[in-house]
Amino acid sequence: MTGLTAKENVLDPNRHIGVVSSAFPSRAFVNLGDETAKSGTSLYGHPLGTGQVGEFVLIDCDSVVVVGRVSAVRLIERDRLVVNPSLGDERLVDPIGEVDLLATLDRQSGRVYPGIATRPRLGAHVYSPAPDLMSALVADAAPGLADGSAKLSLGVVTSLQDASVAVMPERLFGRHCAIL
């Protein structure tokens, strides 16, 4: 896999943020837990995704890992007043994240495939990806991005400012292209 080494732990236990509570063909709902309701957390010198809207997540599906993106976060009705301390009592909340399922990472080959090869099961563990991992996954999803070839930096992955994205100019300009 581009940019990843064998020592890199794709599903780092320190990045665990929740479990799947509902699964659908292209979407999953994740119980995020109270600790993920807090933002501003960091791990290994990088911001730690906590299941906020727009963040990427990894879902453990045994032999594969499903890559998803959080599209909505909500509280169940009984927890609704807890987020405003002046209206409710002080207690833990259990936010639910809605995750759009985007791609599949094969753990054996390290390849990224578009679409979902295996649907998440109930109770599947959900992790926040490391920025280096997301950079490698984006590069791996763009075939032909070989080491040593000239790369055009496009910016960073939204919600992971430490994860840069680059592409070979031939892949970008070899077809119809507009830069706005």
Image (cartoon, helix red, strand yellow):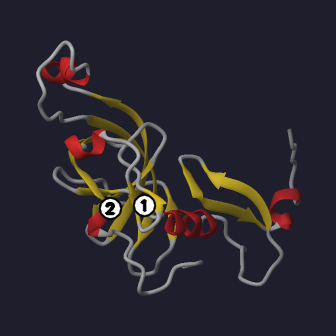
- The residue to which callout 1 is attached is 129
Q: Secondary structure at mark 2?
A: helix
Q: Is residue 28 above or below residue 2?
A: above
Q: Residue at x 46, y 46 (%)?
A: 55
In the picture as drawn, the residue positioned furthest to the front comes out as 86
Sequence-wise first label, 1 or 2: 2
Q: Secondary structure at mark 1?
A: loop
Does 128 sit left or right of 36 as displayed?
right
**Disc assigned to residue 15:** 2
Q: Is residue 82 above or below residue 42?
A: above
| The C terminus lies in quadrant | top right
In the picture as drawn, the residue positioned furthest to the top comes out as 87
User: Badge 1: how crowded within 10 Å, few (<14), some, or many (20+)?
Assistant: many
Q: Residue at x 49, y 40 (%)?
A: 54
Amino acid type of the residue tagged 2 in the rendering: Arg
Q: Is residue 10 above or below residue 103?
A: below
| The N terminus lies in quadrant | bottom right
Q: Is residue 78 above or below residue 112?
A: above
